[in-house]
Amino acid sequence: MSSAEQRVDVPRLLARLRAQDSGRPRVTWYGADGERVELSARVLENWVAKTANLLVEELDVEVGDAVRLDLPAHWRTVAWRLALGAVGAELADDDDGDPRVAVVADGAPVPADAEQVVVQALGALALRAASVPAGALDAAAVVAGFGDALPHVPGAPGLVVGASGEPGARVLVDVPPVGDAAALDAVLAALAGGGSAVLLGPGAPAAERVAAQEGTTA
């Protein structure tokens, strides 16, 4: 871990954000065709808990297991990243062969090297994926059935994120110029610093317009 990074205990982070203001927007996502999704601290914690319980109870993910997220920078991906940190799973990259689990976007190619495959629909109101290969799990169809409390995972080392900038800042993150990985890192760093993030996906309204509407400060 470099000096520009920090290790975050995910359950404590989410509890702290909720205690500060449970209804304050923490992640706001803009997509194409006017799609906008806003997650308060309470709602974000709920999504992370359900996803973490899916990882532990359905997929049997343990501390140190490799999980590949083949997903774009998106509010659902933020929930997955935080859930991986909560259960102590390692984020695998494309060069890591044979991951324990691979999570892919709906309609994307399914990797042949993963033990288990999860398909994640990215539509704001999607209740299931449009295409789920045989043997794969449809995240949108099942995640709501998992518990709302974060699982207790002894030995989880926490999530490594970039050092946050101004504490409490509301950060505007425009995905196309910086790329998915950098955008996700910026969102997680903002949360770790007690702030919030507005994430602009491809096809979102102009950054200047959104910045004025959302009151971003960084």
Image (cartoon, rainbow, N blue to C red):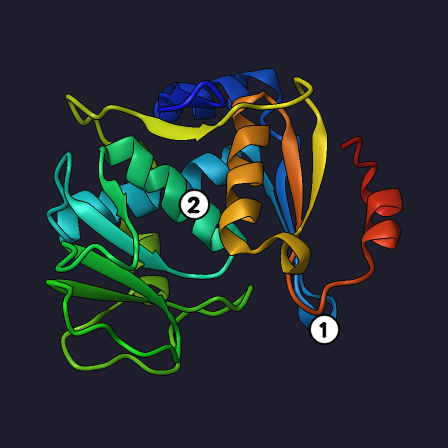
Q: Which of marks 1 and 2 is nearer the N terminus?
A: 1
105, above or below 30, in the image: below
Q: In which quarter of the image is residue 84?
A: top left
Q: What is the spatial separation of the Cα atoms under label 1 and label 2, in whole angstroms?
A: 22 Å
Instruction: Tell me if residue 147 can be seen.
Output: no
Q: Which image quadrant: the N terminus?
A: top left
Q: How many labels does the image show?
A: 2
The residue depicted at 24 percent of the width and 61 percent of the height is 102
Instruction: Indicate the position of residue 194 as horizontal and vertical percent values.
Output: 59, 21
Q: Viewer-proximal residue, 162 or 122?
A: 162
Q: In this view, does 72 lie to the left or right of 66?
A: right
Task: Kindly state the secondary structure of the residue where label 2 is placed.
Answer: helix
Q: Is residue 155 left or right of residue 214?
A: left
Crowdedness near tag 1: few (<14), some (14–19) or many (≥20) residues, C-alpha within 10 Å:
few
Task: Kindly state the secondary structure of the residue where label 1 is placed.
Answer: helix
Q: Which image quadrant: the C terminus?
A: top right
Instruction: Indicate the position of residue 209 as horizontal and vertical percent values.
Output: 88, 53
Instruction: Tell me if residue 40 can be seen.
Output: yes
Label 2: which residue?
Answer: 79
The residue depicted at 12 percent of the width and 39 percent of the height is 62
Three-letter amino acid code at the position of disc 1? Asp
The residue depicted at 37 percent of the width and 26 percent of the height is 10
162, above or below 3, in the image: below
Three-letter amino acid code at the position of disc 2? Ala
110, above or below 216, in the image: below
Q: Residue 33 carries which label?
A: 1
